Amino acid sequence: MIAIAQVTVLEDRAAITRRGTLKLTAGQQRLVIDRVAPVLADKTLTATCSGARVLDVRCERYVAPWREGAPAQATSLREELTAVEAKLAAARVRAQVARAESDALAQLLEAALADLAAAAARGQGAPTAQTDLADLDARDAAARARRVDAELEAEDLAAVAERVAHRLRTAETEAGEQAARLVIDVIADAAPGATIDATLTASYIVPGAAWRPFHRATLQRDAGKLDWQTTACVWQATGEDWTDVELHCSLERPSLGVEPPDLVDDELRWRRRPETVVVEAREQEHHTTGLGALEVPGIDDGGLGLRLSAQRVSVKADGTPHRVPVAAFSTTAQVSLVAIPLRSTAVHVRARFVNTSTTPLLAGPVDLIMQSGYVGRAEIGFVAPGEKAYLGFGPDSELRVHRTETRDRDNAGILGSWNVETVRVAVRLSNLGAHKRDVTVTERVPISEVEQVEVVPSAPDAYMLDEGDEITQVTARAFDDRGLVSWSVELAPLGRRAVTLEYKVKSQKSVAGV
C-alpha cells in the first residue's frame, strides 16, 4: 500500500509524499496508485524507487467508478423534471383562467344587483331575478373551487419540481466528479524468478490546501503565569484524505519567483505656497518592537521561511478547518491594569510576557482563556524569540472609569495674533471590589507638526476638581515624546480617585482647521 506518508502545507498549496514498500520481480512492470488527488499539478509529479529504475510516471484521470451510473440517473431526472414543469405550467394556467372567470362573474353579479335595485325603485318587478342570482352564485362558487384546486395543485407541483431539481443538481455534480491514479513503470534488475524488496516514493503538489497560525493563551492571573499554545489551522479540499500523516507547515513562498520588482518613476510637483495654513488632526498609530504589526498580509514570518512540524494527524478533504498543535511554552507574565479613557470606559487586564520558545510567534488570532474560562479573542503580531509582547485579556468588572472633557476658546482680537483653546480633561476611577488595585491611566496631548500651532501642557495642579473629600486627586504624572501622559493610580477597596489634565492649543490667526 503506497499511502500518504508526509504532507507539507504552504500558504496556498500542499506538497504530498506517498511512500510504501513492495516486492518486485525481475523485469519491467507497472505499478498503479489509485485514489490520488485529481487536481495535482502534473509537472510536479516525480517518483523514485529503491532497488529498481523508474521508467515513466504519469497521472490518469477518469470518472470515479462509484459515479458511473450518474449520467443515466441525471438523464432520467431531467426528463422527470420536464414532465413536472409541464404539469405545473398547466395548473398555473387553470388557476389563472379560474381567477379570471371568478372576477367576471363577480362583475356580472354586481351589475345584476344594480339592475334589480333600479327596477325596484321604479316599481317594476323581476320574476326571474331570484333564479338568475342563484345561478350566478353557483357559477361563482364553482369557479372559486376550481381556482383553489388549481392553486393547491400548482403549489404541490412546485414543491415536487424543487425536489427533483435538487436531485438533478446533485446527480450532475456527482456525474462530473473525477478521480485519478498514478501509473508508474519500473524495471527491476534481479535474477529471473527472484523477488526484491523495494521502497517506492511518489511526490506531487496540489492546490486547494492552506494553513494559518492560530494561538491560545491561558493566563493564571494570581500566579503570574501564561501558557501559550500555537496551532496550525489547516484547510484542504484536494480530493484525497490525509490519514495518519506526518504534517509540516511551511512558510516558504515558491510562487513569488526570483525576479526583483520593477522600479517606477517618482514624480515631484510644485505649487505656490498658500497664504492660509490649513491644518487637521489625525490619528497616528505607533509600532514598536515587541508589539507586532496590526495588519498582516498572509502570514508574517519575519522573512525567515519557517517550517513547523506536528505530530501524526488526519485531515479530511472536506474544506473545513482543522486545528493541529505545533508549538507550546509556558512563561511568567506581568499582569497590570490599564485604562485609556479616551478610547474605552473600561479598565483592561494586560499581560506582559516574553517569548521564551525557540521559534517566533506568528501573527494571527489568539483565543484568550482565564480562570473563568474563555474571555474573548485578540490579535498578535510577529514576536521573535526572546522578545516581549503585550496581550489584553478584557476589562476588569470591579473597576469603573468616567471621563469628562471641556474646551474653552479665546479668539484673538483685532490686535492679537494667536487663538487659544484650553482643553481640560478629568478622569474619575472607582473600585467596587474588596481588594486594592493599581491602575495605569493614559491620556493624550496633541503634538504639533507646524510652527504656526503650539500645544502647551499646563502644570499638574493647574486644573483641580472641587469635589471636597469625596474623591482624592492624583497629580504625579509622566510625559513621553509621543504626547502620552500617564498616571499611576492606587485604588483602595471601595475607593475613588481622579486625575486631571489641562493643555492649551495656540494657533495663529492665519491657521484654518483648528
Image (cartoon, rainbow, N blue to C red):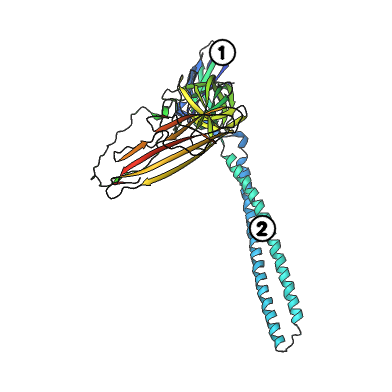
Amino acid carrying label 2: it is Ala
Tell me which numbered mark, 2 or 1, is placed earlier along the sequence.
Answer: 2
Residue 341 at what x, y percent from top left? 49, 37
Out of 268 and 79, give the one closest to the viewer. Answer: 268
Work out whether residue 237 can be spotted. Answer: no
Vertical arrangement, residue 178 with respect to residue 386, above or below: below
Q: Residue at x 35, y 43 (%)?
A: 420
Q: Is residue 185 left or right of residue 72?
A: left
Q: Residue at x 61, y 42 (%)?
A: 171
Amino acid carrying label 1: it is Asp
Q: Quadrant of the N terminus?
A: top right
**Where is mark 1, residue-wise?**
197
Label 1 SS = strand
Vertical arrangement, residue 179 with respect to residue 114, above or below: above
- How many C-alpha atoms fall within 10 Å of the one at disc 2: few (<14), some, or many (≥20)? many
Query: Which image quadrant is residue 199 in?
Result: top right
Work out whether residue 487 can be spotted. Answer: yes
Q: Say which mark, if any, is on residue 154.
A: 2
Q: How many marks?
A: 2
Q: Is residue 439 left or right of residue 418?
A: right
Q: Is residue 165 left or right of residue 259?
A: right
Residue that sits furthest to the front in the current view? 468
Q: Find the distance from the CA under tag 2 to the CA under tag 1.
A: 69 Å
Residue 204 at what x, y percent from top left? 49, 25
